[in-house]
């Protein structure tokens, strides 16, 4: 079985607009209390302002029929663990791995700890090609 048999997506298409509106952020001093800068709060606020400004900018450009630069990213994603038949990861302690002998019996108190060792999907994303199209293409 090849990676292509595990294909999760084939491509992503989108458009990019040139930034016309610049975000306006409050000063860092507004996030400094008693000489201590609250970096997390400032970062979250800056992300929100950036997101809001970008959406307003794109909306305005779309309303004026400004053409975006189109792109297409071709790639694959697949679950690295798809063919792994083990219920628990390799790094699980032996007493946790032993629970896999009877998956229907969840009475053992170790099941609470076992959840952190489940062999869950692990997606790998690989970009194969990126194409940029001229306006109007």
Image (cartoon, rainbow, N blue to C red):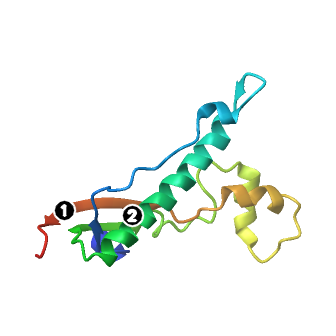
Q: Is residue 51 visible?
A: yes
The residue depicted at 51 percent of the width and 61 percent of the height is: 52
Image height of 133 relative to 28, above or below: below
Residue 39: quadrant of the picture: top right
Q: Residue at x 37, y 70 (%)?
A: 60
In the figure, 16 relative to 102: above or below?
above
- Residue 132: image location, x then y, percent: 16, 64
Horizontal side of 24 relative to 100 (left or right) equals left
Relative to 102, is 129 on the left or the right?
left
Q: Residue at x 16, y 64 (%)?
A: 131
**Which class describes the residues within 10 Å of circle 2: few (<14), some (14-19), or many (20+)?**
some
> Residue at label 1?
129
Q: Nearer the viewer, mark 1 or mark 2?
A: 2
- Split into 4 quadrants, where in the image is the N terminus? bottom left
- In the rendering, at what x and y percent does residue 108 appear? 87, 64
- Residue 2 visible? The answer is no
In the depicted view, which residue is nearer to us: 119 or 127? 127
Q: Residues within 10 Å of mark 1 (few under 14, many from 20)?
A: few
Q: Which quadrant would residue 78 be assigned to in this image? A: bottom left
Residue occupying image coordinates x 77% and y 77%: 104
Residue that badge 2 annotates: 57
Q: Are marks 1 and 2 in contact (CB under 8 Å)?
A: no
Task: Residue 58 in the image: state x and y as whole percent.
Answer: 37, 67
Q: Position of residue 11 (x, y in %)?
A: 28, 73
């Amino acid at each position: 079985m090849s990676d292509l048999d595990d294909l999760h997506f084939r491509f992503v298409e989108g458009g990019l607009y040139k930034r016309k509106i610049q975000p306006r952020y409050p000063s860092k001093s507004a996030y400094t209390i008693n000489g201590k800068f609250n970096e997390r709060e400032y970062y979250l606020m800056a992300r929100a302002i950036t997101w809001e400004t970008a959406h307003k900018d794109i909306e305005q450009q779309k309303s004026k029929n400004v053409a975006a630069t189109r792109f297409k990213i071709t790639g694959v994603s697949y679950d690295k663990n798809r063919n792994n038949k083990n219920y628990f990861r390799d790094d699980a302690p032996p007493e946790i791995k032993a629970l896999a002998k009877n998956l229907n019996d969840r009475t053992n108190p170790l099941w609470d700890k076992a959840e952190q060792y489940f062999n869950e999907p692990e997606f790998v994303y690989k970009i194969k090609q990126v194409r940029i199209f001229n306006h109007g293409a």
